[in-house]
Amino acid sequence: MRLALTKADSVWEGLSAGEARPVLAADTVVAVDDRVLGKPRDVGEASEMLEQLSGRNHRVLTAVALRYRDRVLSRVECHGSEISRTTKEERIAYCETGEPMGKAGSYAIQGRGAVLVEHLMGATPPW
């Protein structure tokens, strides 16, 4: 939640008084067991994250913050996901597409990463 609020505040503070408008910000993390997976720093870390998720259930948490003037609304959405069991070669091939970079947990369900997802639980994605 903290990063979504920080993003919203940062953008808000950069607006001039004449351009005041609502600011919407979000940030996502993936939680598996007692670990929180953010965005990978490099392809090696992306592959490691995908290995941790392979054949496992995990939670995807997205914090959203909406700021306008002195008012801030925020919430966290959570859904469960299960990644198919993947081979090292499959993980490397996916990482080589570049898609995992900048994605929490190293996969993008709205992109090529959708083929990795075995099952979704909870909130239905909007796509």
Image (tube, rainbow, N blue to C red):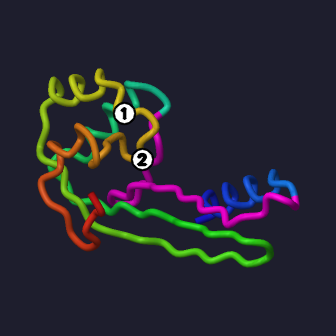
SS under mark 2: helix
| Mark found first going from the N terminus, 1 or 2 | 1
Alpha-carbon distance for marks 1 and 2? 9 Å
Question: Could you tell me residue 63's position as x and y percent?
Answer: 51, 65
| Of 124 and 90, the residue lying toward us | 124
Residue 46: image tag: 1
Q: Quadrant of the N terminus?
A: bottom right
Q: Is residue 43 above or below residue 105?
A: above
Q: Quadrant of the C terminus?
A: bottom left
Question: Could you tell me residue 120's position as x and y percent?
Answer: 19, 63
| Of 118 and 124, the residue lying toward us | 124
> Quadrant of the rendered structure where residue 45 is?
top left
The residue singled out by tag 2 in the image is 104
The answer to whether the residues at label 1 and label 2 have Cβ atoms under 8 Å apart is: no
Q: In percent of the image, x 38 and y 25: which residue is there?
A: 44
> Quadrant of the rendered structure where residue 49 is?
top left
Q: In percent of the image, x 34 and y 32: which residue is there?
A: 99
SS under mark 1: helix
Q: Tell me which amino acid carries mark 2.
A: Ala
Q: In percent of the image, x 27 and y 48: which residue is there?
A: 109
Q: Tell me which amino acid carries mark 1.
A: Ala
Range of residues picked out in magenta: 17-40
Question: Could you tell me residue 74's position as x and y percent?
Answer: 58, 74
